[in-house]
Amino acid sequence: MSPSIIGPDEAAALVGDGATLVVGGNGGTGVAERLLEALESRYHTTHSPSGLTLIHVTGVGAVTEKGLCRLAHEGLVARVLGSNFGLQLPLMRLIVENRIAGYNLPQGVMAQMFRAQAAGQPGIVTHVGLGTYMEPEQDGGRMNALATETFVERLNLRERDYLFYRMPVPDICFIRGTSADEDGYVAMEHEATTREDLSIAQAVHNAGGTVICQVKRIVKAGSLHPQMVKIPGFLVDHVVVDPDQTQTYTTGYDPSRSGEVRMPVARHAPDPLTERRVIARRAAMELRAGEAVNLGVGISAMIPNVAAEEGIEDLITLTVEAGVIGGVPGYAREFGTAYNPRAIIDQPYQFDFYDGGGLGCAFVSFAEIDAEGHVNVTRFGDRYDGAGGFINITQNTRRLVFSGTLTGGGLSCSFDAGRLKIDREGRTRKFVERVGQVSFNGEMARQRGQDVTVVTERAVFRLAAEGLVLTEIAPGVRLREDVLDRIGFALRVADDLKEMDARLFRQGPMGIAADLKGDAS
């Protein structure tokens, strides 16, 4: 039976009071924006539906607008389960103010959960989350007082500890593709990511729910290449056409992001030399030729721009958790996509690779870090960002590089003749006696034998058996006044303390390609 082609308002009318709604998308890509707009409009007009349970795997939005920001209305949503909330601040605010129940589960677990639900399995059993706030005796993924339900349990199987995760059974979903044929077969030829939309459709269909897919166009039945079809027609109940659908929130359609063409990387100008650029450059020095690496959000997402300037993008394989492999990943509103990707796979399979220890190195950010090497990226100040893929990635990768400024809130630096000058110190201490929430467990990392480096604009640290050790300091920076006094705990200084490479603080390419090529040989 072919799916019906309906308008966005008709689709929004199919969401019932108290329904569990799954919204696909990754950041600003793959979002069924027209459907979310219609649902918000319906609620403003009729105050219906109400009491929704909202499930999303990654952050979906443009920070203060679009995406799930449209659904941030008390009454419309009763509870939300997601891996990250940094791209939907209005929804985060409802959680922080305890106006809706908020739950945070690891991104990889959530992506894989729909496969489990599709197969009739009760949930996911995994080591991911052990030693972090996912532990039931800590927060168990609960984000506020209204979040009283248990979605994480601890198990012991064959004398090993695991966590068991589950999620509510979905009733309806909003997903997206590029083309749907008259029989409902959906291809994603213009999509920059394929996400876990197939798994979502299978899970909702097999639970007896309603699958609604937004596309750019309708084509003749059977005309789509079978290898481009990602969702079979029998899984799709309704199709909504939006001819103005964009690839991302900032790009109408760039064929180099979906693999149709390859574009010259030289088209991208180097980022300005700032303290964040310095950190990304120093982090890039930890790259090793031939490795597959992951790049997180924030400063780490600036590394591809460094790689392009240095001409090393072909010496390593950069990946992002959305399923993109190779090429030059984008950042900001383009994060999750890449120019010239070598492959685009579904996100659950990317996390299978990550969880199994396949990555050579991962580059991630930090908000707080303490003497034990515990890291907090999830709950600090008035922000409850959530883990995203951070827990999956940091627990299972042999080498880790954490990037961030030494202090936060107003820090400003300048550079002259290969030296760093701190023009205005940050107001916020980020190296603290005890982190506010354990997103990464430094003690367990030492037990696992992980190689951990922390990079800031003025100093580099390594995680040793006794905790953090200062190993490098920027030229022009004072050890006591600019580093040690800005850290909230006693810090060991390496006997062979080195200066950071002066090339980091000068304009122009650093010439690190020769170092990586030497590694490759």
Image: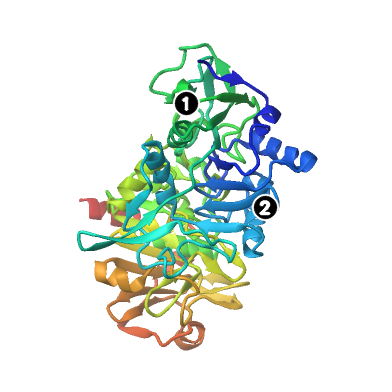
Per the image, label 1 sits on a secondary structure element best described as helix
Which-is-in-front pick, marks 2 and 1?
1
Q: Is residue 505 above or below residue 353?
A: below
Q: For residue 369, which quarter of the picture? A: bottom left
Q: Quadrant of residue 46?
A: top right
User: For mark 1, what is the residue?
Assistant: 235
* Residue at 42% across, 65% down: 136
Say if residue 317 shows up in the picture.
no
Q: Is residue 389 left or right of residue 349?
A: right
Residue at 35%, 41% (x, y): give it: 349
Q: Sequence-wise, which precedes: disc 2 or disc 1?
A: 2
**Any part of residue 450 in sight:** yes
Left or right: residue 304 compared with residue 90: left
Q: Name the residue located 47 percent from the left edge and 37 percent from the top edge.
A: 200
What residue occupies the far right of the structure in this picture? 45
Q: Which residue is mark 2?
A: 64
* Mark 2 Cα shell of 10 Å, populated few (<14), some (14-19), many (≥20): some
